[in-house]
Image (cartoon, rainbow, N blue to C red):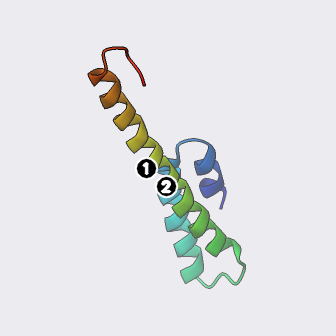
Amino acid sequence: MVCSIVGLCCCGIILGPVGIVLGSKAKNEGSTAGTATAAIVVGIIATALNVIGLILQITMGVFNQWMPSGGF
C-alpha cells in the first residue's frame, strides 16, 4: 500500500507497478483486509496518471519545437 501511495506523489512509473504486484501477492496469500485491493487500485491510478503525464510532456515538447514562438 505504501508503494502505491508514494507512487502518486513521485516515481509513479516505478512504484505504481510495484504496488500492483505487492497488492496482488498479498491478495493471493489470503489477506482479508481491503488494503490489498486498495494497493492494487491506487497502484493502477498512479501508473495511469504518470503515463498520461509522460505522454503530455512528450507531446508538449514536440509542439514547442515546431512553434516559432516557443509556446502556445
Count the marks.
2
Give x and y (percent) for residue 60: 39, 32
Name the amino acid type tagged 1: Val
- Tag on residue 4? none
Element carrying mark 1: helix
Tell me the distance, in whole angstroms, between the alpha carbons under discs 1 and 2. Answer: 6 Å
Q: Secondary structure at mark 2?
A: helix
Q: Are marks 1 and 2 in contact (CB under 8 Å)?
A: yes
Q: Position of residue 51 (x, y in %)?
A: 43, 49
Q: Which mark is residue 47?
A: 2
Outermost right residue: 33
Pick the front one: 44 or 52? 52
Q: Quadrant of the C terminus?
A: top left
Give the residue at x 65% y 70%: 38
Question: Image check: 4 left or right of 18?
Answer: right
Residue found 65% across the figure and 54% down from its top: 5
Residue at image position (42%, 40%) is 56
**Residue at coordinates 31% horizontally, 21% vertically from top-left?**
67
- Dividing the picture into quarters, in which one does residue 36 lie? bottom right
Circle 2 residues within 10 Å: few <14, some 14–19, many ≥20: many
Position of residue 22 relative to residue 71, above or below, is below
Judge whether 67 appears above or below 29 on screen: above
Viewer-closest of 63 and 72: 72
Quarter of the rendering occupied by the N terminus? bottom right
Q: Residues within 10 Å of mark 1 (few under 14, many from 20)?
A: some
Say which residue label 1 marks. 51
Amino acid, disc 2:
Thr
Q: Is residue 56 left or right of residue 62?
A: right
The quadrant holding residue 27 is bottom right
Left or right position of 28 against 32: left
Of all residues, the one furthest to the top in this rendering is 69
Q: Could you tell me residue 13's position as x and y percent? A: 46, 48
